[in-house]
Amino acid sequence: MIHTKILGTGSYVPNNIVTNQDLEKLVDTNDEWIQSRTGIVNRRVTQGENTSDLAYKAAVKALEDARITAQDIDLIVVATVTGDFPFPAVAQLLQGRLGCNIITAFDVNAACTGFIYALNVADKMIQSGAYHKALVVGAETLTKYTDFEDRNTCVLFADAAGAMVLGTSDEPHIEKILTYAKGDLEGLLSMEGYPLKVDFKTPDQKRPFIKMQGTEVFKFATTVLPEVVETLLKETNHSVDELSLIVAHQANRRIIDKSARVLKIPIEKMFMNIDQYGNTSAASVPLAIDEAIRTKRLKRGDLFITAAFGGGLTWGGAMIRY
Ligand code: UT7
C-alpha cells in the first residue's frame, strides 16, 4: 500500500504588522478586550501582495525544505476562500509562477478547514498511485474581505500562507484524515457573493464582507474540535499520551483553552501562535505546523493531531506522524 509523508513545510506572512492599538483608532475596541476575548495581540495585513504572492513565497520555502524542485511536483492543491480571482485558481497561478511541469492544479474551498480538506484530497490522490509529489497550500488575504468598520470581525482576521510538500512512503505517516460539512449552518459564518442580475442594467451592489455570528460559531468550535480529536484517537488506536502536540486552527485562544480542558490535555500540548497572527483561515493550520517544526516543538517521528473548523460550516482533522 502507498502511504503519504510530509517531505517539507514552509510559510510566509506579510511584513506589515497591525497592532490592537492600530485597530483602536478604527473601531470602538481596546487592547484589553481583544487580548482577553481572543488572545490576539498582532496580526499581519498584506500591502500590495495578493493570495498567490503569499502562496508562492510559502511554497518556495516548502520546496527548499523538502529538497526538491518545482519540476518534481505533479499535483498542486491550494485551500483558499480569497483567491486573487474567481478564476484562474491560485493553484494554477502557482503552477505557472513556480515553473512546474504541466500538471494537475486546483483550489478547494472549505474556509478555515480548507487545509485539512486539501490535505485529504492530496493524500488520497497520492495513495491512488496516480500522483507522487504534491504541493498543498493554505493561503489567504482575508483582510480584503474584512469590514474595518465592524469591530466584531475586523480584530480577528489576517493574511498568511503555509505550504506542505507530500511524498510517498512505505510506512503510514498520515494515518487518518477526517473532513465534515454541515451546510444547514452556513449562515453562521459566510460572505455574500454578487446576486444574479435581474437584467443587465442592475446596478453593482456594495462590495461584500465576511459576516459571523461569533458566539454561535464559538459553541460549534468548542464542540467539534474535541470531538474530532477524540474520533481520530479512537480510529487510529492512539492515546493522548502518545501525542507530541495538537495543532488546532488559530481562531480564538479561548476555543483552544476550552478544548484542552474538555479533552483533559495539558495546555502545553496545544500549539498557539494566534497572539502574533490572528485568524488566517486556511493558512492558519499550515502556518502553525511550519512554526511548530521550525521551533522544534515537532520533530521527525513525533505524532501529532491537526484540526480545524470554520465556514460552511466545516470541520476536520488529521493524525500525522511527522
Ligand atoms: O475561523 C472561523 C471560526 N471562527 C471562530 O471560531 C470565531 C468564534 N467566535 C469567537 O471567537 C468569539 O465569539 C468572538 C471573539 C468573535 C467574540 O467574543 P465573545 O466573547 O463571543 O463576544 P460577544 O460577541 O458575545 O460580544 C460581547 C460584547 C458585546 O457587547 P455587549 O452587547 O455585551 O455590550 C460586543 O458588542 O463585546 C462586544 N464586542 C467588542 N467589544 C470591544 C464585540 N467585539 C468587540 C471588540 N471590542 N472588538
Image: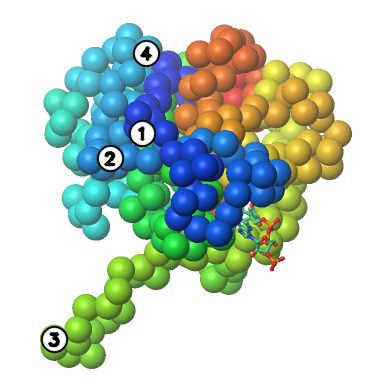
Q: Which residue is mark 1?
A: 16
Find out if the beta carbon at label 4 lies less than 8 Å from the nearest ligand 1 atom.
no
Left or right side of 37 for 83: left
Left or right side of 144 for 127: right
Q: Quadrant of ligand 1?
A: bottom right
Q: Nearer the viewer, mark 4 or mark 1?
A: 1
Q: Which residue is mark 2?
A: 47
Residue 187 at x, y percent in the picture: 54, 71
Residue at disc 4, secondary structure: helix
Q: Which residue is mark 4?
A: 66
For marks 3 and 4, give the CA distance: 50 Å
Left or right side of 28 for 11: left
For marks 1 and 2, give the CA distance: 7 Å
Q: Are marks 3 and 1 in contact (CB under 8 Å)?
A: no
Left or right side of 305 for 109: left
Residue at disc 3, secondary structure: loop
Q: Earlier in the sequence, mark 1 or mark 2?
A: 1
Amino acid bearing label 4: Ala
Q: Are marks 4 and 1 in contact (CB under 8 Å)?
A: no
Q: Residue furthest front?
A: 25
Q: Which residue is mark 3?
A: 200
Q: Residue 145 appears in which quarter of the rendering?
A: bottom left
For marks 3 and 1, give the CA distance: 40 Å
Residue 166 at x, y percent in the picture: 41, 23
- Which residue is nearer to you in this view: 143 or 149? 149
Residue in the picture at 50% in, 13% down: 294
Q: Are marks 3 and 4 in contact (CB under 8 Å)?
A: no
For marks 2 and 3, give the CA distance: 34 Å
From this view, report whether residue 271 is shown above or below residue 114.
above
